[in-house]
Amino acid sequence: EVHPYYVVTEFAANDEAQEAAAMAAFEDCMGNGWVSDGVISASDAQAAQLWRLREGITEALARYKPYKNDVSVRISAMPAFLAETQALIGQAYPHFDVVWFGHIGDGNLHINVLKPDGTGDADFVAQCEHVTKLLAQVLARFDGSISAEHGIGLVK
């Protein structure tokens, strides 16, 4: 199934009681409908395979020559920021695929606009730079930053 969000999270359990508490929290999220599907690794090897899904995103997007914005906002502002930014990007890039990922629990988000086949590099960058200016305005309203943990990119 396609879902609006996918989450990889990790916790360290010092004992069986903490592990049981984490499982109870996971089951509570499932019961409340906040999580529609999930998996818990049974070994370090399985955990590494799950993290590889997240860590491989940048590599998987490289062939599309993505235009990247690394942004950050307060964690408490993230839901409202996401809603406003998704609407802005949907209007600004109606024909572009956009891949969002990041460290949402830290307030950092990577917005990757994928260059469509047949679109020239200069045209693509010009459209993206225009929207980056609009994105900066949204970030200002949320007291956010256009630079997240990776700093300023080459295009910036």
Image (cartoon, rainbow, N blue to C red):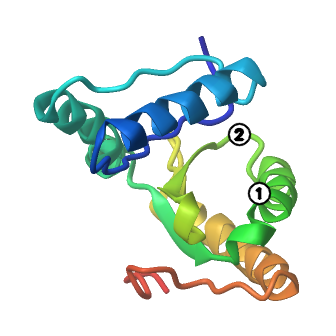
Q: Is 14 situated above or below 104?
A: above
Percent coordinates x, y for residue 132 in the rendering: 68, 75
For residue 29, say whether it is visible: yes
Frontmost of labels 1 and 2 is 1
Mark closer to the chain start, 1 or 2: 1
For the residues labelled 1 and 2, the Cα–Cα distance comes to: 19 Å
For residue 110, say whether it is visible: no
Q: Is 127 situated above or below 19?
A: below
Q: Is 18 situated above or below 107?
A: above
> Which residue is outermost to the left?
45
The answer to which quarter of the image holds residue 88 is: bottom right
> Which residue is outermost to the top?
1
Local secondary structure at mark 1: helix
Q: Residue at x 83, y 83 (%)?
A: 137
Indicate the quadrant containing the N terminus: top left, top right, bottom left or bottom right: top right
- Mark 2: which amino acid? His
Local secondary structure at mark 2: loop
Percent coordinates x, y for residue 121 in the rendering: 46, 61
Q: Residue at x 40, y 39 (%)?
A: 17
- Mark 1: which amino acid? Leu
Q: Residues within 10 Å of mark 1 (few under 14, many from 20)?
A: some
Label 2 belongs to which residue? 95
